[in-house]
Image: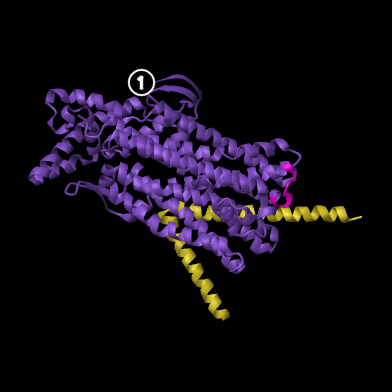
Chain colours: A yellow, B purple
């Protein structure tokens, strides 16, 4: 099962690499859109997780005698 | 006598502009909100915190309203090409129809199917499976836009096709070069990311409304933070990608870039100012007053300090030989149609790049037939045709500036909003919350101005340098056009009213009443007037 999962991940990696090489070469702006959108989603998500950490930090400080 | 009356052409243009602008009020929000929902749900899957699921469900419902009405407004447009632009459809249908068909079959079906799963699958799918569905909805909606913009890019810079003298239409040479043309790429990326800005402002503005009223704080501060960060990165990207589009226009659509910048005479680098404000006069072909920033225009447009930008007067002069060559092409084409003589075909092929300019001259030719212009009248016809190559400079100049001014404002607002959100000082700066709330419609307005810049700047062509707009329309009666225009205006106004009513209603109700435990049935019953 583990081997199958590893093979699946390896296949996904190969497809991603082929995609990056082909689209990066033929359509650099399409490639930039894919990478940029993923980056925007992840950074904005990280921003809200940071808010959770900030609020926890504040409540910990308030509860500390 | 005209073969298609100018009044009908203008009414057809107005009708298409009206339906496109109405439709485009919904599109940007769909493009951006789907990826914001994906971001919210990603955080939910990673952290397991219920609030992020509530966020995805609440904003998902507002997305649902926008999506449903947006689809309805878009459907009519595809038929308009056939009904009102039949000459264009014949001439360019091979090029234009293919991406449109792919859009319908692949992206639209994909998007619609997965939207259903996204709404109804919360309690029926695993977290990971539902997240994958949400990403597929986002991808599907943006792929819809991709194919439309590929088709539109073909109208602006027709690549990967040639005119066939036997079938009298443009035919595909290479599908790959159509899909991967620089114009297709830059148009898609710029438009898609402009949608991200619109969605960010939408989420940030409604979150600001809650914070101002002291409601739903837990959801509002998180949504505001996410939207502010989403918005600031997208704003930077959209400005960068706009610059790419400007560069494309400089290289491939010089009349458009000259009109955008209000350049009547070829520039003298590097001093040339970038005009911030002016009153372009299309009749007299001058700017009545100008306020500009010196040394900015040349690097901005040409990405150099020594290359000039062609002015509209010089572009008119350059069009003269092309109009003559186009007349030769059309005359050879007519003879080829009658005789099928190879010599006529060879002559046509030698001049076919200028064929569109020949079409443009038909307006001024005796009996609207360029093949029978007497030699003594040729110079007059060419001279009369030369100014026709320019778009409406006033409209293009100002629509571009409104878009740019608004884009700069968004960048500033998102930057301040991100900073204050990261410092947890939102509630202390109520002016920012008010500014965010009142700015909700502005990105939609900016995308509309962008669309006007691109499409009005393409004039007088439907297919740039190939087919003039006045030869593209269908031969309807004026009464028919007025009747259908009034019908569309009425119907689309009802759609807008319904959208605004539902958006306000659900935004005011907020996530508590319609959040964590609401189901799609609540949404549909509310749309039908039931008590959600």
Left or right side of B247 for B335:
left
Could you say which quadrant of the image residue B51 lies in?
bottom right
Residue picked out by circle 1: B283
Left or right side of A49 for B406:
left
The answer to whether any part of residue B245 appears in the image is: no
Q: Position of residue B363 (x, y in %)?
A: 23, 29
Is A34 placed above or below B242 here?
A: below
Give me the residue at 36% from left, 21% from top. B285
Q: Position of residue B157 (x, y in %)?
A: 34, 43
Left or right side of B56 for B140:
left
Q: Chain of mark 1?
A: B
As for residue B218 lying within the magenta part, the answer is yes
Give me the residue at 34% from left, 52% from top. B177
Q: Position of residue B458 (x, y in %)?
A: 36, 36
Q: Nearer the viewer, residue B305 or B226?
A: B226
As for residue B291 lying within the magenta part, the answer is no
Is B71 placed above or below B441 here?
A: below
Q: State which region is magenta.
A: B213-219
Q: Position of residue B18 (x, y in %)?
A: 42, 38
The answer to whether any part of residue A48 appears in the image is: yes
């Amino acid at each position: 099962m583990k081997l199958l999962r590893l093979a699946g991940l390896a296949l996904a990696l190969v497809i991603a690499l082929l995609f990056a090489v082909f689209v990066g070469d033929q359509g650099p702006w399409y490639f930039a859109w894919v990478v940029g959108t993923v980056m925007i989603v992840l950074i904005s998500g990280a921003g809200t997780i940071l808010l959770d950490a900030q609020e926890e930090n504040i409540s910990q400080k308030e509860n500390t005698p | 006598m005209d073969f298609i009356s100018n009044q009908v052409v203008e009414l057809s243009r107005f009708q298409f502009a009206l339906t496109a602008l109405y439709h485009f009020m919904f599109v940007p929000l769909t493009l951006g909100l789907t990826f914001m929902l994906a971001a919210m749900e990603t955080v939910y899957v990673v952290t397991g915190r219920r609030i992020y699921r509530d966020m995805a469900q609440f904003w998902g419902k507002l997305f649902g309203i926008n999506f449903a009405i947006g689809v309805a407004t878009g459907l009519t447009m595809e038929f308009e090409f056939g009904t009102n632009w039949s000459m264009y459809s014949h001439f360019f249908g091979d090029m234009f129809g293919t991406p449109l068909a792919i859009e319908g079959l692949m992206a639209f079906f994909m998007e619609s199917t997965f939207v259903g799963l996204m709404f109804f699958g919360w309690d029926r799918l695993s977290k990971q499976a539902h997240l994958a569905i949400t990403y597929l909805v986002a991808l599907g909606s943006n792929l819809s836009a991709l194919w439309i913009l590929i088709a539109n890019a073909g109208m602006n810079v027709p690549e990967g096709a040639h005119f066939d003298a036997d079938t009298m239409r443009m035919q595909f040479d290479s599908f790959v070069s159509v899909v991967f043309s620089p114009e297709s790429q830059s148009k898609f990326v710029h438009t898609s990311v402009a949608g991200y800005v619109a969605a960010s402002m939408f989420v940030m503005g409604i979150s600001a409304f809650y914070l101002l009223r002291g409601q739903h704080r837990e959801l509002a501060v998180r949504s505001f933070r996410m939207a502010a960060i989403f918005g600031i990165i997208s704003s930077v990207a959209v400005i960068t990608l706009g610059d790419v589009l400007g560069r494309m226009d400089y290289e491939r659509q010089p009349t458009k870039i000259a009109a955008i910048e209000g350049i009547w005479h070829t520039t003298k680098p590097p001093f040339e100012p970038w005009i911030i404000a002016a009153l372009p006069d299309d009749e007299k072909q001058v700017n009545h007053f100008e306020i500009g920033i010196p040394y900015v225009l040349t690097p901005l447009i040409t990405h150099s300090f020594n290359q000039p930008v062609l002015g509209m007067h010089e572009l008119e002069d350059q069009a003269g030989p092309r109009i003559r060559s186009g007349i030769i092409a059309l005359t050879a084409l007519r003879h080829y149609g009658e005789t099928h003589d190879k010599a006529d075909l060879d002559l046509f092929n030698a001049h076919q790049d200028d064929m569109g300019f020949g079409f443009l001259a038909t307006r001024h030719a005796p009996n609207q037939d360029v093949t029978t212009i007497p030699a003594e009248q040729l110079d007059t016809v060419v001279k009369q045709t030369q100014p026709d190559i320019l778009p409406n400079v006033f409209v293009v100049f100002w629509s571009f500036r409104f878009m740019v001014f608004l884009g700069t404002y968004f960048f500033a607002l998102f930057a301040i909003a991100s900073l204050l959100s990261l410092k947890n000082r939102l509630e202390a700066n109520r002016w920012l919350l008010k500014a965010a709330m009142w700015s909700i419609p502005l990105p939609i307005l900016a995308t509309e101005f962008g669309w006007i810049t691109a499409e009005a700047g393409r004039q007088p062509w439907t297919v740039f340098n190939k087919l003039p707009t006045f030869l593209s329309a269908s031969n309807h009666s004026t009464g028919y056009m007025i009747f259908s225009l009034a019908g569309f205006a009425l119907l689309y106004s009802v759609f807008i009213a319904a959208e605004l009513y539902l958006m306000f209603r659900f935004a005011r109700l907020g996530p508590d009443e319609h959040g964590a435990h609401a189901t799609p049935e609540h949404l549909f019953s509310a749309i039908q007037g039931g008590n959600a």
